[in-house]
Image (cartoon, rainbow, N blue to C red):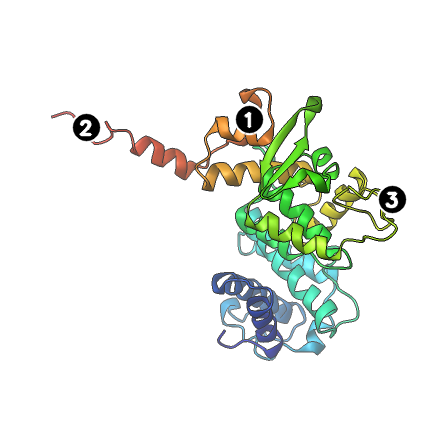
Amino acid sequence: MDNSPIILEDFLNYIETIKGKSENTAKEYFFDLRTLFRFLKLRYKLVDKNAPFDEIDISDIDETIIRKVTLQDLYAFISFVDKDRNNQNYAKARKVASIRSFFKYLHTKIKVINENPAIDLESPKTSTRHPVYLSLQEAENLLDSIEGTFKERDYAIITLFLNCGLRLSELVSIDIDRIKGDTLTVVGKGNKERTIYLNEACLQAINDYLEVRPTEGVKTPNALFLSNRKNRISNKTVQYLVKKYIKDAGLDVEMYSTHKLRHTAATLMYKYGNVDIRALQQILGHENVSTTQIYTHIDDDRLRKAVKSNPLSKKTRS
């Protein structure tokens, strides 16, 4: 990007070439971080307080300035974009995600800062009047946030949640011998079995995990997902790791949970896959279709298109 400091250029190259982010996503990170850097120059009195904000040069931002940044500075920035630039909660949440990714990269990848000031940075609260789910981009960011010793296991867990809409109890009870080709049999509510069809992402994630899954000293050998003690993974452990990665992705840990990932899967299938409500009911294992209807909240664009597609939509009085 034009006029970018080297430290920002390197980060943008990293998220595109290593993390596989799109060019448009990289541009969003650039705009968010450019705004942050301009704010920091004002806050640290490195430019005249009356300088036009959008003309502040950020090319001189370096590690010395970055190392000064505190959590207090970051909250001050979120307050600034709220009050002075009229950012709504979505825009502020996106900036929080950009900041968290940037400082995580500086701290854990290239190690130019000793402490990550953004690790406890919270996203602004958003309305919960409608059912809560992750957008497609947020779901991708969540998957991209998965790292660490158990990354293959955790990636497979969250991939299954986001693609299949499993309940927590269904996921932890998966047995290896219930996976046959691209199908998985799970036991749902009321001890009822149902078949889940696994897409390419799920099959790849499961296979990647099976390559590193322990085989020696396993106390529950048929369990797919194991804890670090080689027992079947518990509900509590899965809830913990989901919350961890939700936080790492810059999302609100108070708003999202394992059940919201199930909700996300249903919403994405309904919105992008042209899945009708009866098929969705079967996928989710709902006894009554009325339960499934809470997952089919439709965005305004789809409602608008539905009305315009009415064959009488062009009929006017002659």
Q: Which residue is mark 1?
A: 292
In the structure shown, which secondary structural element does the residue marked by tag 2 occupy?
loop
- Disc 3 to disc 2, C-alpha distance: 69 Å
Q: Secondary structure at mark 3?
A: loop
Residue displayed at 61% across by 53% down: 204
Q: Which quarter of the figure is the C terminus placed in?
A: top left
Residue 68 screen position, x and y as percent: 74, 71
x and y, in percent, of residue 152 in the image: 71, 55
Tell me whether the residue at label 2 lies in contact with that at label 1, contact meaning CB atoms closer than 8 angstroms. no
Residue 82 shows in this picture: no
In the image: residue 120, left or right of residue 25:
right
Mark found first going from the N terminus, 3 or 1: 3
- From mark 3 to mark 1, how far is it between C-alphas? 37 Å
Residue 291: horizontal and vertical position, in percent? 58, 23
Q: Quadrant of residue 148?
A: bottom right
Residue 315 numbered mark, or none: 2
Amino acid under label 2?
Lys
Packing grade of label 2 (10 A; few <14, some 14-19, many >=20) is few
The residue wearing badge 3 is: 219
| Left or right: 73 in relation to 237 | left
Vertical position of residue 143 compared to residue 36: above or below: above
Other-residue count near label 3 (Cα within 10 Å), few / some / many at <14 / 14–19 / ≥20: few
Res 97 quadrant in image? bottom right
In front of the other: 23 or 6: 23
Q: Which residue type does callout 3 highlight?
A: Lys
Against 295, residue 252 (above or below) is below
> Viewer-nearest of labels 3 and 2?
3
**Disc 1: CA contacts within 10 A as few (<14), some (14-19) or many (>=20):** many
Amino acid type of disc 1? Thr
